[in-house]
Every structure is written in C-alpha cells, then in structure tokens.
Image: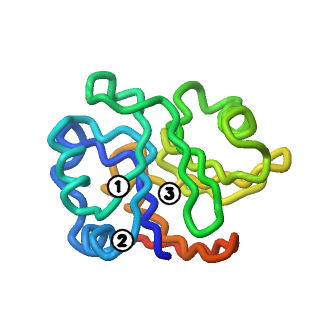
C-alpha cells in the first residue's frame, strides 16, 4: 500500500496550490495523511478530491475546518498517529512522541508538521515523521513530501522534493 504524507500546504495564505508532481503522487496513493495547516476549507476540499482516502489532523491555521487535533489510522499493519505538533520548536519532538504514546503506544509512528522541516527520527523510542511543506510555504527552504510503502507492518519511506 502506498501512502502520501504531506503537511503545511498553507493555501491560500502562503501558496496558491500544491505543485503538479506532488498532486500526481497524492492522486496515485492508496491513502493520504495530512498533518495539518491546510489553511482553508477550499484547500481541504481539494486534497479530499485528489485522494481516495484521507486521514488528517488540524493545524494551528485550521481552527474552523472541522478536523480533529489528532487522528489515528492503521494501514498495512502500521499504526500512524497524526497530529500537527503545534507549539514552540523547543520540545516539539517530546510533544509529538507523547501524543503518539498516549493515542496508540510507542510502536505507532507519529506524523506531524508545523516546523516545515523534513524529519525521520526515533525520539525516546517513537518513530517520528515530518514531511515538511508540500508547497514550500515559508519558513520551508524547499518543497517536500514523503511517500511510504507499508505492508505486513513494514514501512519503507521515500523523500520527494522540488
């Protein structure tokens, strides 16, 4: 199963659209995970129209678009806990790892955004992913997203950048 992992699209406040190559990856994926900061109802609707299945959490710029603060989904034997990671950069990994443990245990994979920086690390026993910004919205220094192949509990990750 292929999963497109995106975050921090910030449409329309910081970007006008997701770049076409990233849209194609989102459309081709079996499932899409978005870690928040769509920035508008229209941006959320556009991602929903591109994706067969979507799991998303609200970001700090998404207060009124009807998304939960945290969402959990099991795909290909891997449990993902999706949250935005809102707050100071200081303590970010602690906050996200704590959310993952509370929602699904340390074996789950945390997906968060907020910093606009790529991240694939294990923090205090919890794997954390941050796909950066799919539109390159400031403060990102480039446009990035992740795809993951998951099967039988195994996860293989690919970084895509423009």
The nearer-to-camera label among 3 and 2 is 3
Q: CA distance from mark 1 to mark 3?
A: 11 Å
In terms of sequence position, does the residue under pointer 1 or pointer 3 come before the other?
3
Q: Which mark is residue 131?
A: 3
Position of residue 97 in the picture relative to residue 124 (left or right): left
Give the image quarter of residue 95. Answer: top right
Secondary structure under the numbered disc 2 in the rendered image: loop
Q: Is residue 59 above or below residue 155?
A: above
Distance from the alpha carbon under mark 2 to that under mark 1 = 9 Å
Circles 2 and 1: CB atoms closer than 8 Å: yes
Say which element carries label 1.
loop
In the rendered image, the quadrant that contains the C terminus is bottom left
Residue at the spot of label 2? 162
Name of the residue lying farthest toward the right: 124
What residue is drawn where x is 51% and y is 40%? 71
The x and y percentages for residue 122 are 77, 55
Q: Residue 132: image x %, image y %?
A: 47, 54
- Marks 3 and 2 sit apart, C-alpha to C-alpha, by 13 Å
Q: Is residue 139 above or below residue 20?
A: above
Out of 15 and 1, give the one closest to the viewer: 1
Q: Residue at x 21, y 35 (%)?
A: 40
| Picture quadrant of residue 148 | bottom right
Q: Residues within 10 Å of mark 3 (few under 14, many from 20)?
A: many
- Counting from the top left corner in percent of width and height, residue 157 is at 59, 73
| Badge 1 density bin: few <14, some 14–19, many ≥20, Cα 10 Å | many
- Mark 2 or mark 1, earlier in chain: 1
- Vertically, is 2 above or below 47? below
Q: Which residue does the numbered mark 1 point to in the structure image?
A: 136
Instruction: Identify the residue shown where x is 42% and y is 63%.
Output: 144
Horizontal side of 42 relative to 51 (left or right) equals: left
Residue 9 located left or right of residue 17: right
């Amino acid at each position: 199963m292929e999963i497109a992992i995106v975050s921090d699209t910030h449409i329309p406040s910081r970007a006008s659209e997701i770049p076409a190559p990233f849209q194609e990856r989102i459309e081709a994926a079996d499932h899409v995970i978005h870690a928040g900061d769509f920035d508008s109802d229209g941006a959320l609707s556009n991602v929903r129209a591109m994706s067969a299945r979507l799991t998303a959490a609200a970001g700090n710029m998404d207060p009124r678009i009807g998304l939960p603060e945290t969402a959990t989904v099991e795909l290909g034997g891997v449990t993902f806990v999706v949250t935005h990671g809102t707050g100071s950069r200081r303590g970010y990994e602690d906050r996200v790892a704590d959310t993952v443990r509370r929602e699904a245990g340390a074996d789950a994979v945390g997906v968060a955004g907020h910093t606009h920086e790529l991240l694939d690390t294990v923090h205090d026993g919890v794997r954390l992913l941050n796909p950066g910004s799919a539109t390159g919205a400031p403060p990102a220094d480039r446009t990035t997203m992740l795809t993951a192949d998951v099967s039988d509990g195994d996860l293989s990750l690919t970084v895509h950048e423009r």
